[in-house]
């Protein structure tokens, strides 16, 4: 097996783990949506979204990683808001 094949297997394993974690996150998001609906709260909370973005950006080591994490999390947040309905 080539080095590239080994690295791709690592990516495949990580993608599975990421997908499983996202599905867990989405389950919690749906619960949050139910609470917001019950309590008459809006789906969007810009302050909370920026708080999440700031937290994940702080995990990265350099500016490129920070930007990549922000892009990914903005997509996750957008998808999550669609599930809160």
Image (spheres, rainbow, N blue to C red):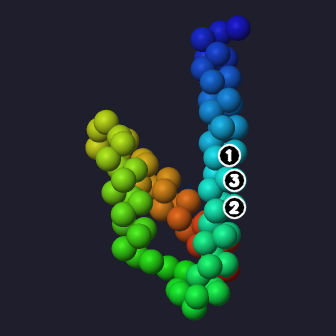
In-image side of 16 versus 77 (left or right): right
Q: Is residue 82 visible?
A: no
Residue designated by label 3: 23
Extreme-left residue of the structure? 63
Q: Are marks 3 and 1 in contact (CB under 8 Å)?
A: yes
Q: Secondary structure at mark 1?
A: helix
**The N terminus sits in image quarter:** top right
Rendering coords of residue 18 (x, y %): 62, 42
| Viewer-nearest of discs 3 and 2 | 2
Q: Are marks 1 and 2 in contact (CB under 8 Å)?
A: no
Q: Are marks 3 and 2 in contact (CB under 8 Å)?
A: yes
Q: Is residue 30 visible?
A: yes
Residue designated by label 1: 19
In-image side of 67 versus 42 (left or right): left
Q: Few, some or many C-alpha atoms within 10 Å of disc 1 (few <14, some 14-19, many ≥20)?
A: few
Q: Few, some or many C-alpha atoms within 10 Å of disc 2 (few <14, some 14-19, many ≥20)?
A: some
Q: CA distance from mark 3 to mark 1?
A: 6 Å
| Viewer-nearest of discs 1 and 2 | 2
Residue designated by label 2: 27
Residue at (32%, 47%) from the top-left corner?
58
Q: Secondary structure at mark 2?
A: helix
**The C terminus sits in image quarter:** bottom right
Q: Earlier in the sequence, mark 1 or mark 2?
A: 1
In-image side of 16 versus 80 (left or right): right
Q: CA distance from mark 3 to mark 2?
A: 6 Å
Q: Secondary structure at mark 3?
A: helix
């Amino acid at each position: 097996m080539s080095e590239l094949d080994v690295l791709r297997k690592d990516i495949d394993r990580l993608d599975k783990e990421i997908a499983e974690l996202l599905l867990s996150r989405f389950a919690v998001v749906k619960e949050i949506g139910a609470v917001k609906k019950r309590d008459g709260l809006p789906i969007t909370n810009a302050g909370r979204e920026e708080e999440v973005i700031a937290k994940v950006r702080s995990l990265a080591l350099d500016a490129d990683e920070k930007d990549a994490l922000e892009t990914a999390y903005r997509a996750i947040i957008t998808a999550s808001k669609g599930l809160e309905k």
